[in-house]
Amino acid sequence: MKSTLLEDLKVELKNHIDDLYQTDMPLVFGDGNPDSAMVLIGEAPGKQEVQKGKPFVGQAGKNLDQFIDILEIERTDLYITNVVKLRPYKVNEDTGRESNRTPTKKEIGIFSAYLMRELEIIMPRLVVTLGNIALKCILQDDKASIGVLHGEPAQTKFGAAEFSLFPLYHPASIIYKADLKDVYLQDLHKLKKYLKEMKIKE
């Protein structure tokens, strides 16, 4: 049932985005177990994810592998999605090369209603956000800061979906800020303990 509703939502979103951009836009939809008690939400897909049509593959997939290893869970235990389902990128005028960029408020606004409906279908008990974009979207608060809220679970509501929210730094951020790596790993171990407390993981 949930799978059918998610497939219908994908078709609706694809038609809406193609109409909006007046072209066939490659989108990366959520992936995983729709009956999962836990949903992982990232920012937006990168180049490799668009090529594979799945979230968290390539370098992002290596980050996810570490996440899964520390928590001692399986990828099949998760439903994984992004706030924005298309790749935000910029083009270097000198080289013509594309590189990822942060999604704009407009892009986040276009996709946030669909993320809400996605979560309303899945109805998870726990949502883990990665980075500021996902955190602000779920809390619907532009002033929310991962630097303040990371590693601290809180009950929240997003549309009709009510769940525990566990904010984490985005794994990509620790590549550029090495001092965050220890904090990120500490938060992952806090999350592992919290999963046991919630009886999501025995």
Image (cartoon, helix red, strand yellow):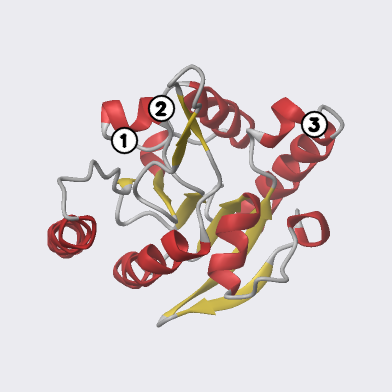
Identify the element where label 1 is drawn.
loop
Instruction: State the image coordinates of residue 29 (x, y, percent, origin top left).
Output: 29, 48
Q: Is residue 71 left or right of residue 76?
A: right
Instruction: State the image coordinates of residue 77 (x, y, percent, origin top left).
Output: 41, 43
Disc 1 residue type (three-letter): Lys
Disc 2 residue type (three-letter): Val
Mark 1: few, some, or many residues within 10 Å (few <14, many ≥20)?
many
Farthest residue in the right direction? 179
Residue identifier under label 2: 57
Q: Which residue: 44% across, 56% down?
A: 83
Residue identifier under label 1: 54
Q: Which residue: 51% across, 36% down?
A: 73
Instruction: State the image coordinates of residue 125 (x, y, percent, origin top left).
Output: 49, 66
Residue identifier under label 3: 177
Q: Quarter-wise, where is residue 111 in the image? A: bottom left
Q: Is residue 100 left or right of residue 121?
A: right
Q: Taking 15 as reference, is 65 above or below it?
A: above
Q: Is residue 155 left or right of residue 110?
A: right
Q: Taking 4 as reference, is 58 above or below it?
A: above
